[in-house]
């Protein structure tokens, strides 16, 4: 481990790459983790007690000194310098305190948008379209040239569903706006204005924690218990055996079985006059345990949606914005045409969704709320996208992800009782352990060595590093992980 | 009207009250509106066409040059200087580009929190509790000493409902955590883990636009049509006649009728084993038409909730943070004890809710999501609260609100065919016009004179100015409004 002095903090204004930084914010990362106390340490423990007086805190892991964090390294309240491969649940694209993003504190657009925040649906900034163009359209998936900004992943998914419902009912009306009878009956939540439509989701999925999104979220009971839900249909998502090349038959059968379930459920609901208006699916079921599915499965799923006039929504909240080794994970499926709607948030900084032209809602105030996202996020994303492109970070993420998988496969071969089912796209990489207790223990041992990794599902470990995770971070990760596995 | 030069813009760094401002952001407001083109003008029209290429835009009213806005004045893309009494749907507490908030661009906490955004539920900032204390606990309603931060009003309300559901089920279990049977059955959305609980709302209410919040939102059909809903009960909200003192009997009967409906609906649902777990209500039904109810009504409502073990949620998203002339509108009811939960957003900058100690959820990851709000908002709110207190803005809002009501009553007496039912709390003031067409026309005539006012319900005008709305703005408002009414 490095001495604490290896972490160079800018106690006064410092210059990096010609960018003057704001006093008090770190400007370089340590070369190695440096652990001084147990984690969480005594200061985190103290702060947790203080927090309990004003705000619930049972899920808090540690308190973080964000001004001291830099790049791939998090610094906690006790001064521990931790290599972070989980990055605030996969949400920091360029690592902590990226100097070009910190330099935006001098951009009048950022502070104005923060303190004079627009109601975007009614009074957008004069440069709103330009910001959307630079930040979001410039990285849009092929075939999806329109976008709707929102605040977070959940509000993106909620509004994607609303768009699908409105589209479905509009199609039923032959493209017409709601009738007087629709408008009247919806105020009492009766047919025809309030339709009995449903959304099909998958076992193991996670799409957010509002009541509607919980109705298609099936990753963990703790998210769902005690909360009323919509009676919406649920299908199985493939559960593959690894390595894939040795289990083609099983895995293909999984695809077929799950697709048949989707077809049957859509047909049953149609029969029952509770039509499925949308299917929502993650490219990788992340929270649920990093379950992957084949390109063939997604081709099949899209075809079923098309055949039934059902909106095909791909939830890229966790997989989007470069982490999969392509800008969007679904691009790796080579679909004949794009999904109908692709939702995003996390590494995209702002929430929202791309949609096909035919999913544009033409009537005002149907997809609307006070803020509809926030231009500060667009100002930051605009710069982040510039950096991502200039530095080829998506391609580098693909390459380092392949190295990460290779390294984990080596661990898998050395510790076959402890590491299984290594899988990944880009740096969205995971492996399984034998049980929940072992997985949790491994995470804690690694953390005490200064390596933060994420858990998912019941027994899996997931990596969700920033797009600046490089060779040296990979070596430290594999080294500390192997040391941790050895002590299990 | 003033010449354009009256708007002093800081083309270079300028100093106001000792605060150095960021170059390019306005530092003073015009003394009067200055309208140069029709509104929206040719530049707004052009920008709307550009926006259509990348983002839906049918509800856009005008594009705004936010760097040029200051105080109570908005400057649109065409350089029109407009006195804004609607303030981004009631969401800007201290007016545009308040110098002390703009000065926060130099605060390292602001930029760090923006570019290294924490997953607050797991890795909060070391100063999180302090920020919450300064920004939110220091203005907490009496009896509500804990708070949960969220991103917006809708996520605040969604999580308030979740808290109520969890509380209700926990009480049914005698205070215990969910059983194994609960945890298993909820994954298939079956009893007992997924309960048939409901939320009681009111006709005319607005609580947000997620699917669940739409199920208790009944202000306008355009919000609800084509969207599936929870089958939850709905009661009438009082509809008073004005002036109140002349219609005591009618208004009291309204209270009684509505309270009886609430009692009956709760009893019917209990009979039907679809218990009401929460009642959600606004102090003023804002979007629905600025409908007020008496302190007696809310006392009665709280008592019914207590008698039935139902969570009493007051939605102060629009009425909170000072605009009512008290920090929270419900404080004016003098309830025997505080509501169980009070939700906020808009002028509070961050979303969230205060809750009574017994509504604290003790298990981790039940009230949780990736971001759970955002510390940048707390940094700004901390300063805004400091300004509000130092400058007595809540008391001033009460006083100027009374003057606004007086002025409107004078207009009511002069134009009895055009202005009715003047009512208000603080500057949350409204009046009715004779029909929707007249209301919309009046709003447009006023806008063309440089006065922005808001509409609500079918025929109402609402004022939602910032807390810095002062005597001179009031005089301009009444003057332009009277001129507009005359031309109707």
Image: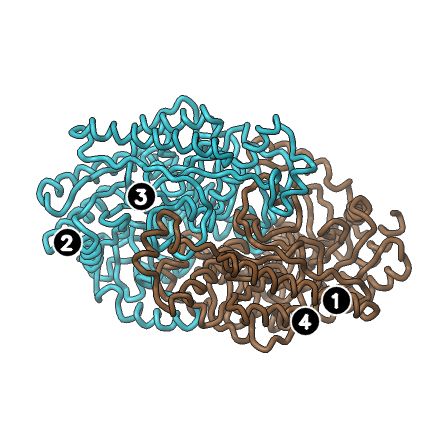
Chain colours: A brown, B cyan
The residue under label 3 is: B468
Judged left or right of residue A160, residue B434 is left
User: Do discs 3 and 1 belong to a common subunit?
Assistant: no
Judged left or right of residue B16, residue A273 is right
Between disc 1 and disc 2, the foreground one is 1
Judged left or right of residue B414, residue B385 is right
- Element type at mark 3: loop
Instruction: State how far apart marks 4 and 2 are (Cα).
Output: 62 Å
Instruction: State how far apart marks 1 and 2 are (Cα).
Output: 72 Å
User: Do discs 4 and 3 belong to a common subunit?
Assistant: no
Q: Which mark is residue A253?
A: 1
Badge 3: residue crowd in 10 Å (few <14, some 14–19, many ≥20): some
Extreme residue in the top direction: B336
- Element type at mark 4: helix
Badge 4: residue crowd in 10 Å (few <14, some 14–19, many ≥20): some
Viewer-side residue, B196 vs B6: B196
Viewer-side residue, B212 vs B94: B212
Q: Which mark is residue A295?
A: 4
Position of residue A483 measured from the top left corner of the image (x, y, whole percent): 87, 52
- Residue B242's place in the image compared with A313, above or below, is above
Extreme residue in the front direction: A271
């Amino acid at each position: 481990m490095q001495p604490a002095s290896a972490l160079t903090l800018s106690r006064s204004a410092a210059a990096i790459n010609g960018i003057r930084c704001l006093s008090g914010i770190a400007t370089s990362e340590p070369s190695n983790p440096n652990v001084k106390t147990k984690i969480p340490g005594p200061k985190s423990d103290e702060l947790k007690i203080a927090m309990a007086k004003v705000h619930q805190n049972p899920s808090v892991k540690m308190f973080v000194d964000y001004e001291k964090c830099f790049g791939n390294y998090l610094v906690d309240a006790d001064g521990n310098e931790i290599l972070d491969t989980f990055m605030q649940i996969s949400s920091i694209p360029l690592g902590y305190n990226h100097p070009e993003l910190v330099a935006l504190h001098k951009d009048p657009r950022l502070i104005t948008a923060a303190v004079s925040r627009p109601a975007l649906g009614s009074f957008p900034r004069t440069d709103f379209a330009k910001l959307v163009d630079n930040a979001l359209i410039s990285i849009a998936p092929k075939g999806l040239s329109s976008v709707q900004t929102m605040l977070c992943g959940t509000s993106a998914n909620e509004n994607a569903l609303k768009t699908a419902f409105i589209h479905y009912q509009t199609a039923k009306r032959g493209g017409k706006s709601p009738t007087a009878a629709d408008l009247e009956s919806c105020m009492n939540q009766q047919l025809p204005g309030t339709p009995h439509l449903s959304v099909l989701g998958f076992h193991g999925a996670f799409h957010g924690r509002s009541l509607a999104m919980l109705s298609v979220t099936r990753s963990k009971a703790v998210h769902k218990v005690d909360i009323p839900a919509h009676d919406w249909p649920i299908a199985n998502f493939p559960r593959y055996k690894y390595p894939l090349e040795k289990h083609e038959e099983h895995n293909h059968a999984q695809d077929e079985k799950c697709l048949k379930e989707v077809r049957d459920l859509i047909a049953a609901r149609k029969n029952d006059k509770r039509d499925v208006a949308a299917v929502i699916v993650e490219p990788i079921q992340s929270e649920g345990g990093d379950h992957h599915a084949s390109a063939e499965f997604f081709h099949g799923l899209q075809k079923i949606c098309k055949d039934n006039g059902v909106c095909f929504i791909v939830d890229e909240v966790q997989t989007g914005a470069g982490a999969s080794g392509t800008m969007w994970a679904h691009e790796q499926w080579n679909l004949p045409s794009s999904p109908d709607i692709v939702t995003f948030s996390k590494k995209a900084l702002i929430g929202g969704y791309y949609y096909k032209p035919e999913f544009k809602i033409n009537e005002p105030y149907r997809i609307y709320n006070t803020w509809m996202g926030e231009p500060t996020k667009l100002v930051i994303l605009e710069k982040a996208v510039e950096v991502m492109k200039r530095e080829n970070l998506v391609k580098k993420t693909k390459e380092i992800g392949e190295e990460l998988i290779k390294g984990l496969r080596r661990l898998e071969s050395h510790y076959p009782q402890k590491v299984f089912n290594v899988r990944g796209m880009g740096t969205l990489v995971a492996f399984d352990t034998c049980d929940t207790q072992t997985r949790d223990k491994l995470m804690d041992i690694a953390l005490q060595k200064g390596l933060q990794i994420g858990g998912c599902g019941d027994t899996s470990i997931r990596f969700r590093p920033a797009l600046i995770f490089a060779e040296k971070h990979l070596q430290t990760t594999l080294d500390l992980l192997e040391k941790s596995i050895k002590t299990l």
